[in-house]
Image: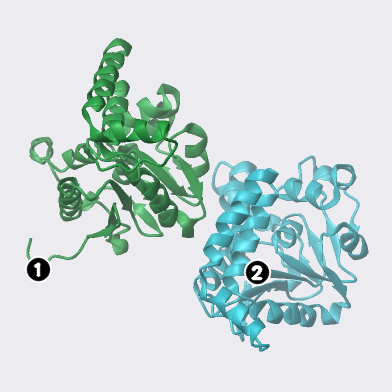
Amino acid sequence: MSTATAELVKVEKKGAVGVLTLNRPDALNALNHPLMDQLEAGLKSFEADASVRVVVIAGSPRAFAAGADIKEMDTKTKAEMEADKHLSRWDFVGAFPKPVIAAVSGFALGGGCELAIACDLIVAAETAQFGQPEISIGVIPGAGGTVRLAKTLGKTRAMELVLTGRRFSAQEALAWGLVNRVVPPEAVVSEALKLADQLAAQPPLAAAAAKRAIRKAIDAPMGEGLCYERGQFFALFDTQDQKEGMKAFVEKRKPNFTGK
Amino acid sequence: MSETTTAAPELLKTADGGVTTLTLNRPDVLNSLTMNMMSGLSNALKDAEKDKAVRCVILTAAGRAFCAGADLGDLKKRQSVKAFSLGDELRDHFNPLILQIRKMEKPVVGAVNGLAAGAGASLILSCDVKVCSEDAKFINAFSKVGLVPDSGMTWFLPRCMGLSLALEHAWLAKPITAQQALHFGWVNRLAPAAQVLEKAKAMAAELAQMPPLSLALTKRALNKALESGFEEQMEYEAQLQEILGRTKDHAEGVSAFLEKRKPVFKGE
């Protein structure tokens, strides 16, 4: 990346928390190629950095992200879209091994909504607006929207939201179990960081195993999920953090986890 | 848009020391609301919300009435153009304006210079604090034409005056006098008609000196209080206090108090 490239994603570390802030406010953080490249690069650097335990993805006050960049694709053909790896960036977020928290303020529409729901937890501003409006421009969500909404909300709500394309509020999202908490807009990032600090204090190997097991549970039949969970559970008995955690519990003191 | 279009604009806007005054200005038709006026009002409120120099807004009207409600002529004209839906009329024009005032994060002072009927009464009830002419009247005559009170009125009424009085007012459609309105808590204070605007300006000037973020978040909290449970509300207060506790205005308020001087709030 040349030094002239605009910083479309701010990459910061706050203690054990890696913070990625989408920084294209003039375009309401529309998720174009360069921005998603930078987001993926930021995530990769956090994946490689053992001192980063949790990642927060935040937007701007007016918009988490208002969608993919329509101007990048309005004239593309089917073959061109298939050849483009852009949408796989969302899959990358969803498969990230460490916990990822979205701090959503303002619009999270289309690709922006899909980015938020690809994260593990969502802290939303009470003024946040979610939606998958793709149908109104002749397409459907292409970065996991139909799948993640169906799996999280069930058929009935996913059908309504995707077929009408209507926006839904933070309060609705909270009631439906799509977001974890709703806070005043000014508090979105601080609340997400607070939550991130809490997760960052957990033993990281257990946190990663928990995330893998829950992701598996969403995709796999019950028996397979249970079997996978059992395997992950047993595997943690090979870690120092398991020994330390249980020892501290017996000795009635706070554990000192090392991530080993 | 309206046939009564004259040289004078339908909405006047004046700014004075952090206070913007918006005046409905169709006195010859008792300031009844056209679509044009409503979008003008909405835009003016939006501008006032964005402008950091504006600390408070006064909403008032020219002539002997505040607002007689929807302009039926304007409504009729739209009726002839497309399939008419009263529901959509409310959804598209009246409801967004009322909601905008309730959600606006700056104080809106209503100066009720006279009659407020229908959507005009809703417009006043949506304001945060109100100074009202002793001669003013509030009318909701929806039942007389076979409709329900709208533009938020059915929400405001039971919260202002309790269920029984709300139903009586909505059903029998008897006017509410200024004295009754004060008694019910619809308005904050009364003044002789000629002094309403002056009193409203004094109130606005006072509000304009207060810490803006504190006023804004207090409005947000009290809005929410009308709909939330006790525990939820206390948690909300804690969240807002966390935010305000980190503002410069809070620090300024505390040091001014300790130094026994007047604080200067900047909205930061």
Q: Quadrant of residue A247?
A: top left
What colour denotes chain B?
Answer: cyan
Q: Amino acid at mark 1?
A: Thr
Q: Position of residue B264 (x, y in %)?
A: 59, 84
Write the residue at 83% across / 49% down: B141
Front tag of 1 and 2: 1
Choose between A72 and B91: the one closer to the eye. A72
Q: Position of residue B230 (x, y in %)?
A: 70, 45
When asked about the image quadrant of residue B59, the answer is: bottom right
Residue A38 image point, x, y percent = 17, 54
Label 1 marks which chain's residue?
A: A
Q: Which residue ends up furthest to the top in the rendered image?
A: A223
Q: Element at badge 2? A: loop
| Disc 1 element | loop
Q: Quick check: A68 above or below B25?
A: above
Q: Say which mark, if any, is on residue B107.
A: 2
Task: Relative to B191, say whether B225 is above or below.
Answer: above
**Neighbour tally class for label 1: few under 14, some 14-19, many 20 plus, Cα within 10 Å:** few
Q: Can see residue A85?
A: yes
For mark 1, what is the residue? A3
Q: Does residue A6 appear left or right of residue B173 in this picture?
A: left
Colour applied to chain A: green
Residue B1 visible from this viewpoint: no
Q: Report the residue at 28% width, 37% height from top.
A: A138
Q: Estimate the spatial distance between the alpha carbons at disc 1 and disc 2, rounded to whole Å.
A: 46 Å
Chain letter for mark 2: B
For the N terminus of chain B, the quadrant is bottom right
Q: Are marks 1 and 2 in contact (CB under 8 Å)?
A: no
- To the question of a shared chain for discs 1 and 2, the answer is no
Q: x, y (%) of residue A149?
A: 37, 31
Label 2 Cα neighbours within 10 Å, binned few <14 / some 14-19 / many ≥20:
many
